[in-house]
Image (tube, grey):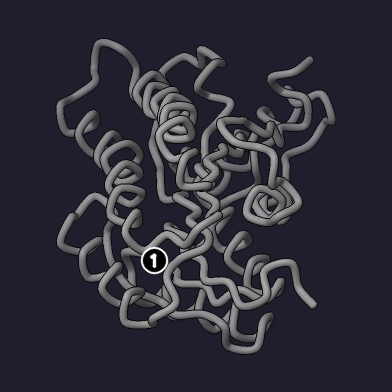
């Protein structure tokens, strides 16, 4: 018996890192998981990974969460599955360094488009499919409160996610739908390494970041996925509008 037997879940941005680990974890606990990603090659690889781990309880749907037509196609596919949705992990996101003074409209639009617009319309378009007692899990970031130089756009988008989580929890409580936010600290993902321009500088960047974590290391995506499972399952049934920091003490100590 898994914690999510006979449940249906959606994880956006699930081709690598935290999204992939979370989708894999939800599937191994019995859920049928729909996953999204913009690049078909990576999406197919993620489907194969989850299939190997969970025996085929996964459906990949290519698309960009910032594109409303792609979201419509995604939710039409889920609707045709015929069982509604019990879990939505709105995880898709990204960003890069962009110091104040050289920020371009394109920088702003791209990051807000994926992280804020994408999260908002993922959740809004999921509403008609959400079953009673469904759980929504948003992916935040310690960057929302850190004040990291050159990271203002990304940090602002994650501050918006914190606000979404609290407001939506209040709006959806009467439907018995819970909304919580998982807040990863520095995590060993391709996205974090991708902030550096090459492999050598990526290694130096990751080492520098890890040295600033009280536990002395980066988190692993699977550690974040464990928290996502908790928020998605009945184990957190009396929790909504809350946040779980999985950050090695970064924002706590």
Location of residue 203 in the rendering, given as x and y in whole percent from the top left corner: 63, 42
Which residue lies at the image location 47% right of the left edge and 49% below the top edge?
Answer: 91
Determine which residue is flagged by label 1: 36
Which residue lies at the image location 28% right of the left edge and 55% below the top edge?
Answer: 125
Quadrant housing the C terminus:
top right
Q: How many marks?
A: 1
> Within the image, what quadrant is residue 211 found in?
top right
Dot 1 falls on a residue whose secondary structure is: strand
Which residue lies at the image location 18% right of the left edge and 25% below the top edge?
Answer: 104
Q: Is residue 166 above or below residue 224?
A: above
> Within the image, what quadrant is residue 55 found in?
bottom right
Looking at the picture, tell me which residue is in the foreground, 13 or 102.
13
Residue 101 in sight here: yes
> Within the image, what quadrant is residue 157 found in?
top left
Location of residue 35 in the rendering, given as x and y in whole percent from the top left corner: 44, 69
Q: Is residue 196 above or below residue 29?
A: above
Q: Is residue 120 above or below residue 47?
A: above
Location of residue 111 in the rendering, given as x and y in whole percent from the top left corner: 30, 36
How many residues crowd around disc 1 within 10 Å: few (fewer than 14), some, or many (20 or more)? Answer: many
Looking at the picture, tell me which residue is in the foreground, 119 or 7.
7
Residue lying at the far right of the rendered structure: 215
Which residue lies at the image location 30% right of the left edge and 48% below the top edge?
Answer: 124
Location of residue 252 in the rendering, given as x and y in whole percent from the top left corner: 75, 18
Side of 119 where 18 appears, left or right = right
Residue 154 in sight here: no
Side of 2 where 81 appears, left or right = left
Quadrant housing the N terminus:
bottom right
Residue lying at the far bottom of the rendered structure: 55
Side of 201 where 114 appears, left or right = left
Looking at the picture, tell me which residue is in the foreground, 60 or 214.
60
């Amino acid at each position: 018996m898994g914690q999510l037997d006979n449940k249906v879940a959606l994880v956006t941005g699930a081709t690598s890192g935290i999204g992939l680990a979370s989708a894999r974890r939800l599937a191994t606990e019995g859920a049928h998981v729909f996953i999204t990603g913009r690049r078909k090659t990576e999406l197919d690889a993620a489907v194969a990974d989850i299939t190997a781990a969970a025996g085929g309880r996964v459906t990949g749907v290519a698309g960009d969460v910032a594109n409303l037509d792609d979201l419509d196609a995604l939710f039409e596919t889920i609707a045709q599955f015929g069982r509604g949705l019990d879990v939505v992990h709105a995880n898709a996101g990204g960003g890069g360094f962009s110091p104040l003074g050289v920020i371009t409209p394109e920088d702003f639009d791209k990051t807000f488009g994926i992280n804020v617009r994408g999260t908002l319309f993922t959740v809004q378009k999921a509403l008609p499919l959400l079953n009673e007692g469904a759980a929504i899990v948003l992916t935040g970031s310690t960057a929302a409160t850190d004040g990291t130089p050159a990271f203002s756009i990304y940090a602002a988008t994650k501050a918006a996610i914190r606000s979404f989580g609290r407001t939506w929890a209040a709006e959806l409580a009467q439907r018995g739908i819970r909304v919580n936010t998982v807040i990863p600290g520095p995590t060993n993902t391709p996205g974090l390494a991708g902030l550096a321009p090459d492999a050598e500088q990526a290694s130096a960047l990751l080492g520098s970041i890890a040295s600033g974590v009280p536990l002395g290391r980066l988190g692993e995506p699977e550690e974040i996925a464990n928290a996502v499972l908790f928020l998605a399952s009945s184990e957190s049934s009396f929790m909504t509008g809350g946040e779980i920091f999985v950050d090695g003490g970064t924002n706590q100590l």
